[in-house]
Image: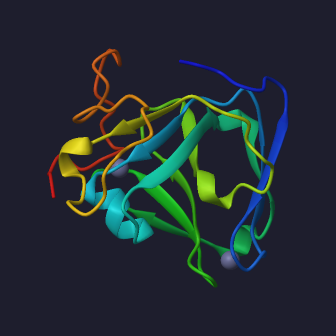
Amino acid sequence: MNVIDSDQIFEGSCACGQIRYRAIGPLAEMIHCHCSDCRKRHGAAFASHVGVLREHFALVQGQDMLQLYRSESGTRRWFCRHCGSKIVSEPDGWRDTYFAAGTLDTPLAAPSEMHIFVQSKVSWYEIRDGHPQHSTYPSEWDEPRPGFHPQRTP
Ligand SMILES: [Zn+2]
Ligand SMILES: [Zn+2]
């Protein structure tokens, strides 16, 4: 897994500012996910997440504002109950926590990126950034990481 900005501290928050978190690098690559689950939860063409070791991610404010939604696949998705911002996805069995890249307040310098579940991509958006695209999970991941995504396609 590619790592960036080792030891750097990254801070993020929800839209209303009541939830604040801190992540300590190294961060894993940025994953743009086009699966129907991510699209619907984020209301966007795709959702962008960055991975960090679970023990390197901590809430610094707003614990009581954090609402859990556990998807059918078992993934725990946390969002702000006041403003609705998606904050974190925690798939069972993965060692990383994935936080929503759009909630970061610390600038992120040119991380490596990839698109996954491109088979579920919306028809009205064309990927033109040149980053690797994977139909579902990248083949180099030695096993599917069950829980992050539902098995269904759109
Ligand atoms: Zn909020
Ligand atoms: Zn997804």
Residue 154 higher or lower than 151, as above or below: below
Q: What colour scheme does the image use? A: rainbow
The residue sitting at 69% across, 75% down in the picture is 15
The residue sitting at 53% across, 47% down in the picture is 49
Q: Quadrant of residue 69?
A: bottom left
Q: Quadrant of residue 110?
A: top right
Q: Tell me where residue 137 appears, x and y as whole percent.
A: 29, 31
Q: Tell me where residue 11 appears, x and y as whole percent.
A: 81, 51
The residue sitting at 36% across, 58% down in the picture is 38
Task: From the viewer's side, name the closer residue of 102 and 9.
Answer: 102
Residue 27: tell me if it is visible.
yes
Total numbered circles: 0
Residue 71: tell me if it is visible.
no
Q: Is residue 135 left or right of residue 45?
A: left
Q: Tell me where residue 107 appears, x and y as whole percent.
A: 78, 47
Q: Is residue 83 left or right of residue 142?
A: right
Quadrant into which the C terminus falls: bottom left
Residue 119 higher or lower than 83, as above or below: above
Q: Is residue 39 left or right of residue 62?
A: left
Quarter holding ligand 1: bottom right
Q: Tell me where residue 94 appears, x and y as whole percent.
A: 46, 32
Task: From the viewer's side, name the closer residue of 108 and 124.
Answer: 124
Q: Residue furthest bottom?
A: 82
Residue 74 higher or lower than 31, as above or below: below
Q: Quadrant of residue 133?
A: top left
The residue sitting at 44% across, 55% down in the picture is 47
